[in-house]
Amino acid sequence: MSTIADVAARAGVSKATASRALTGRGYVSDATRQQVQDAARELSYVAHSSATSLATGRTRTVGVIMPPVDRWFFSELLAGIQEGLFALDYELALYGIRESTTTREQLFDTVLPQRRFDGIIAVGIQPSAHELERLQRSERPLVSVGPYSEGSSAVSIDDVAAARIATEHLIELGHSDIAFVGGSTDAADLSFGDAMRVEGYLEALQAAGLAGSARFAESTPTMPGGYEAAVELLGDRRRRPTAIVGVCDEAAIGATIAARRLGIAVPAELSIVGIDDHQHAAMFTLTTIRQSPREQGHEAVRLLRDRMEHPEGPLERVATASALVVRNSTSAPRT
């Protein structure tokens, strides 16, 4: 295996000059840098990551903190982050740990302070845990993904607008009895983003003079959660709503399955709209608000690169595009 000494000898320069040429740390003329790079390529020389870290002060590693990636949004987002970091020749250290656990607390108390990262991407951080503030105190370049982004560069969608647009679509079709599946009247039971989606739902009803008809079927933002909540919501024919807004597509798909098993025709007897454009949304012909978590991952890496290169620069907030995608799960209510 070739060493930096071999490269220096091949290029006819000192080891220090060869190191500066390959790491970019310190001045080397363009001609000498090209000469050293050609020698390294001829010898198939690859710098050891630890040595490079010592020479440059950088680890070429980014820490990513997020909830477990067992849900579509987080797995797609992680794929986008990984693609973006790979293109920049950075490695990824993933910490996918559920909130409000002793393991999560240990991560912030002892693990992260001891790790060396060039930057951190924090996903879905909740304000109540003050985790974002703890990351900021580490004084490492930081980007957050999600609606809570106090004091950091961030990328997210407008969750309030997403739920408002979804609800307005149903109102425009003529629905006045619209339930929200996955919400709660107690904000403490919701993630920050889901609480904002509840806010958007209520805003749309308020604007249409329907605030008194707001209804919540509490559930986790998952297919099983949406299914269980919808079974209970739809079981009483006399109190059955004509439309449902899901806090996310997974909850909306769960509600769709529940309606079909109860013999309720979608959309003839019940309209359903979700938020996210999940990978299974088209299969269930679900009307939804589209967002692209993979693109958000790419954007998060771009923002982090900017923070690493210009740590004193202004914070940047990016709201990625979202749009209503109308499929066959919504229609005018039956008269």
Image: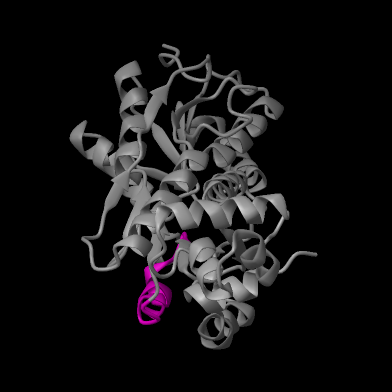
- From the viewer's side, name the closer residue of 252 and 48: 48
Farthest-out residue, top: 335
**Residue 187 visible to an observer of this rendering:** no
* Quadrant of residue 61 within the rendered picture: bottom right
Q: Can residue 103 be seen in this view?
A: yes
> Is residue 42 shown above or below 240?
below
Q: What is the x, y in percent for residue 268?
A: 53, 14
Say whether residue 307 is left or right of residue 248: left
- Residue 320 placement, left or right of 109: left
Residue at x 52% of width, y 41% of height:
294
- Location of residue 311 by image quarter: bottom left
x 26%, y 36%: residue: 204
The quadrant of the image that shows the C terminus is top left
Q: Residue at x 52, y 20 (%)?
A: 329
Rendered-image quadrant of the N terminus: bottom right
Q: Nearer the viewer, residue 334 or 186?
A: 186
Q: What stretch is highlighted in magenta?
A: 123-139
Confirm whether the magenta stretch covers residue 125: yes
Left or right: 137 as drawn, with respect to 259: left
Residue 115 in percent (x, y) is at 56, 80
* Along the viewing direction, whichever of 140 and 135 lies nearer the viewer: 140
Number of residue marks: 0
Residue 264, percent from left and from top: 61, 22
Image coordinates of residue 142 in percent, x first then y, are: 39, 66
Q: Check the image and report above or below for 279 versus 327.
A: below
Query: Is residue 241 shown left or right of residue 255?
Result: left
Q: In this view, does 331 lie above or below 24?
A: above
Farthest residue, direction right: 1
